[in-house]
Amino acid sequence: MAKQPRASAPPSAALDAARSAARNTDSGPARPAPPAAGKGDIPAQKASDTQVLAAAMPANTNKPLEHTPEAPVGLSAKPASRLPTGSTTSESNASDKTGSVAPEGTNATIGTLDRVRVDSGGQRLTTNQGVPIADNQNSLKAGARGPVLLEDFILREKITHFDHERIPERIVHARGSGAHGFFECYEPQTEFTQAAPFQEAGKVTPVFVRFSTVAGERGSKDTARDVRGFAVKFYTDEGNWDLVGNNMPVFFIQDAMKFPDLVHAVKPEPHHAMPQAASAHDTFWDFVSLMPESTHMLMWQMSDRAIPRSYRMMQGFGVHTFRLVNEAGESVLVKFHWQPKLGTHSLVWDEAVKISGADPDYHRRDLWEAIDAGEYPEWELGLQIFTEEQAEQFSFDILDATKIVPEELVPIRIVGRMVLNRNPDNFFAETEQVAFCTAHVVPGIDFTNDPLLAGRIHSYVDTQITRLGGPNFHELPINAPIAPVHNNQRDGMHRQAIHRGRAAYEPNSLGGGCPFQAGAAQGFASIAKRLDAKESSDKMRVKPEKFADHYTQATLFFESQTPEEQAHIVAAFRFELSKVTVPAVRERVVASLLNASSELAAKVAQGLGMALPAPLPKALETPAVPEVDKSPALSLLARPGDGGIRTRKIAILVADGAEGASIGKLVTALVQAGAVPRLVGPRLGTYTAAGGEKFEADASMENSPGFLFDSLVLPDGLAAVEALAADGHSMEFVKDQYRHCKTILALGASQALLTEAGIPMSLPDGSDDPGLILADAAHADTAATDFIAAVGMHRHPARDSDPPRV
């Protein structure tokens, strides 16, 4: 291993700090290192040269040119050395395997095929066989203690299949969870569409839904800050319709051409494969800071929408503008919305981080448990329907996937409900093998010219062919439609259907002309006229002018949040950007935020210890005046649900000597309200109440930490309180519940636990805390009523503070 060169003279404290900072991959300095820091020190030189290289592109000056027919030359800057463009400073350490440093400007993978040719001479040949199995416990051996025989084809088949049980995971949306259910139409929508699910009131269409995170790999955590996939497969009687959306109505990019770049940027960095399931790193923020069209989506991503409390408590959106087409061939434009009946609720960041360590399957478990308990998740489907004439008058372009149609402009029409009422029998066969494709539409649903949607129409099918081993993925049981399938497609890997007859073409006479084309009256027909019907048909690589407004709706989103939600967005940007190691990238993001909100940018800059930069230049200096300045519907708190507490998990701390009658009353009241109370003690097992009655704790503070629960009850009983106070887990339990703004009920003597944990008895402004309920055990009935009402609020944001008070 080559030694790092040593500086000739003792460096100053500033140089020491810079060189120290250059040796970590998790954070970076608020300001660039002194130029002298790189002299004689390779990591510091790399950090210094990287800063200079990144700073050479303070903005993407080509963005305005995307709206002209002639494509500009891409931005570039020459590095001071090869260090910034290398993966590692150790690349010069050569071996017979690694070779040396890559020749500049060369891609060695396009060399001759000699580099991949294989000669198996002298090697053993292995094959796969299968026969009836008489003994599945023992390998075939030459004697009881002899070697295993090669002729044991049963063992070979079993082991070989085991070695191939995994298929490639999805590039994005790899970690998911799914369930079966149904969609029920409220009223016929035949005025707008001939799509099968909307033809009559009460019509039921089976569905399979898959929720997912976007960035993480299959084994990553559920509670990462991320977009959530919300994909619904309708098994209609006219074929499968896949509404493949997200829990956010907008996206990072406007054109599918940029999708590989986005995903490469947000995935773990290729030189060291870190971080997993996180956007808080250099490459993501470098990319989005050079793509100001991402600003609106960044607001959503940094909001609490990115860390939902449950899949059951998040909205879903079709993202793109689609078309509805009726039997007369008339079409309107539509945006799809899924509204959860339980309301929209989220985690807070500290809570999400802790949960990911205690239970990385938190959302998957929550969905499974709710369905198995009969608490079936339910959403209502809403449509925003508008005409092309209306769309032309909007200040934004409805083909731009980075924009929403505010509800104030086009109200949401509720047309039906979706209920998930059955968990899969086998995760792999159903949730993992299900193949959603944006291209899967039915008569009555059609596309628009959204350039991001166009790429998805191709990409999803292409991906499934790779993942599922060939073009016949539609024959896997979970993907098979309930409508009859008749066509002339044949063969391919894993084909299951065995067709009779010899005519595999159309038209034919040998098969009686069958299967015959349905014709426009009964079959799917694309709308001839789309949004560009009045425009030139010249082919060009260009965006419409309204696509260049990258900030107006980002401002709308931020200004529509409550003060507490805005504070969370500030904190999220601060955290994510603190993980960026290149100050120039961090500065560019803040400069972009200035165009959306000067208040947001100033607070983020202050939290990062940096001066406020000049705003980034805009691609469109004078965008159209927006119709809506604030949209309350964009706040999570605008959809609180019905205030009930069904499926909410309530922790009741217990220990020997607890006052038992009040605990019994609370458990009864909570169960009747549909909650899931759990007795949590210092250990599992039986406890004796002050009155001698016995009760069982089915969870311990060690295996079920406080942040896994929606609220907390502290028991009365001096002996129990003393026992709990002596256990450090109790204090963490109470502190996490308070810090995460959850409801706490303290009965009688347990108020001493609040004092011990340093819990303030009032809000920061001195007023009473509605989420802190103090009561005597004798008044448990009244306390239960107040407690249930407070838990129904989900969280008490007035308690929130940055930094936390406790």
Image: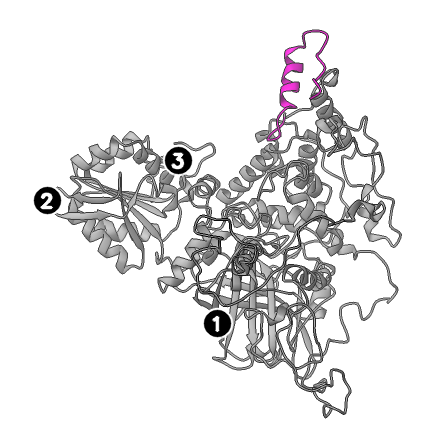
Q: Secondary structure at mark 3?
A: loop
Q: What residue is shown with label 3?
A: 765
Q: Residues within 10 Å of mark 3 (few under 14, many from 20)?
A: few
- In the picture, measured across the screen, residue 339 lies left or right of residue 795, that is right
| Disc 2 secondary structure class | loop
Q: Is residue 530 magenta?
A: no
Tell me where residue 510 appears, x and y as whole percent: 75, 91
Taking depth in this image into account, of 465 and 614 the one nearest to the observer is: 465
Dot 3 amino acid type: Asp
Q: Which residue is label 2 attached to?
A: 691
Residue identifier under label 1? 182
Callout 2 environment at 10 Å: few (<14), some (14 to 19), or many (20+)?
few
CA neighbours of label 1 inside 10 A, class few (<14), some (14 to 19), many (20+): many
Is residue 337 among the parts visible in the rendering? Answer: yes
Q: Say whether disc 1 or disc 3 marks the residue closer to the N-terminus.
A: 1
Direction from residue 475 to residue 331 in the image, left or right: right
Badge count: 3
Q: Quadrant of residue 496?
A: bottom right
Tell me which segment is drawn in magenta.
1-28
Q: Earlier in the sequence, mark 2 or mark 1?
A: 1
The residue type indicated by label 2 comes to: Gly
Q: Residue furthest top?
A: 9
Tell me which residue sits at (43%, 51%) in the image.
144
Residue 746 position within the rendered picture, expressed as x and y whole percent measured from the top left: 25, 41
Q: Is residue 768 left or right of residue 455?
A: left
Of callouts 3 and 2, the N-terminal one:
2
Q: Position of residue 441 (x, y in %)?
A: 65, 72
Locate residue 714, reporting x and y percent: 25, 41
Measured in 3D between alpha carbons, the distance from the residue under mark 1 to the one under mark 3, in whole angstroms, is: 48 Å
